[in-house]
Amino acid sequence: MGDVKTGIGIRTMALLAFAGAGLAGCGIFGGDDNSYVYQGVTFAGDAKALSGDRASFVSTAGPASASLEGAIGGARFEGTKYCIDYLGTSDIAWTVGPDTPAAQIPVQDDEVRLSGTCLE
């Protein structure tokens, strides 16, 4: 009877190990949903609604000092993720966006600031 319990314990442990590995691979444990990697540099970011209008948002990412192009990509990623999460679309009308000339994109506290509206 001791062998049966050991067999069940090993089987259970194996299933838990496979389930844990699967969840870790999906990024559920230890993943960072607010980061974008560009040329080996991680750019942390965020996106927030503007004054009560969930469709309009500002997205930020940095450090812009490491790579302006990478920070812009990170802010674009955050804006797209925001629109998908809140309105179910990835279509965006950018006010200041990834196609804006780099010299015209605001940088504050080492983060780029993009703004736009999610299109339904």
Image (cartoon, rainbow, N blue to C red):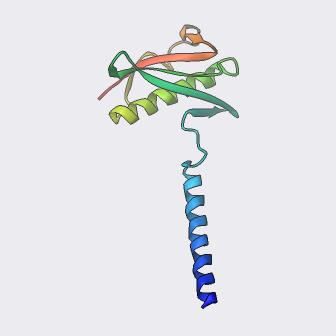
Number of numbered callouts drawn: 0
Residue 65 in the figure: left or right of residue 28: right
Q: Which quarter of the picture shows residue 89? A: top left
* Whole-percent x, y for residue 31 in the image: 59, 43
Q: Residue furthest left?
A: 120
The one nearer the camera, 36 or 18, is 18
Residue shown at the point (39%, 30%) measured from the top left: 83
Q: Quadrant of the C terminus?
A: top left
- Image x and y of residue 106, in percent: 55, 10
The answer to whether one can see residue 90 in this image is: no
Residue 115 x, y percent position in the rendering: 45, 17
Above or below, 64 relative to 11: above
Residue 28, above or below 59? below
Residue 30's place in the image compared with 111, above or below, is below
Instruction: Please indicate, yes or no, whether residue 45 appears anywhere in the rendered image.
Output: yes
Q: What residue is rendered at 50% in x and 14% in y? A: 100
Q: Is residue 26 left or right of residue 94?
A: right
Q: Is residue 6 left or right of residue 100?
A: right
Q: Farthest residue to the top: give it.
A: 104
Give the quadrant of the N terminus.
bottom right
Residue 57 drawn at (x, y percent): 41, 20
> Does residue 10 sit above or below 73 in this rendering?
below
Farthest residue toward the front? 2
**Identity of the residue drawn at 62% across and 28% down:** 43
The picture quadrant where one finds residue 7 is bottom right
Res 4 → quadrant: bottom right
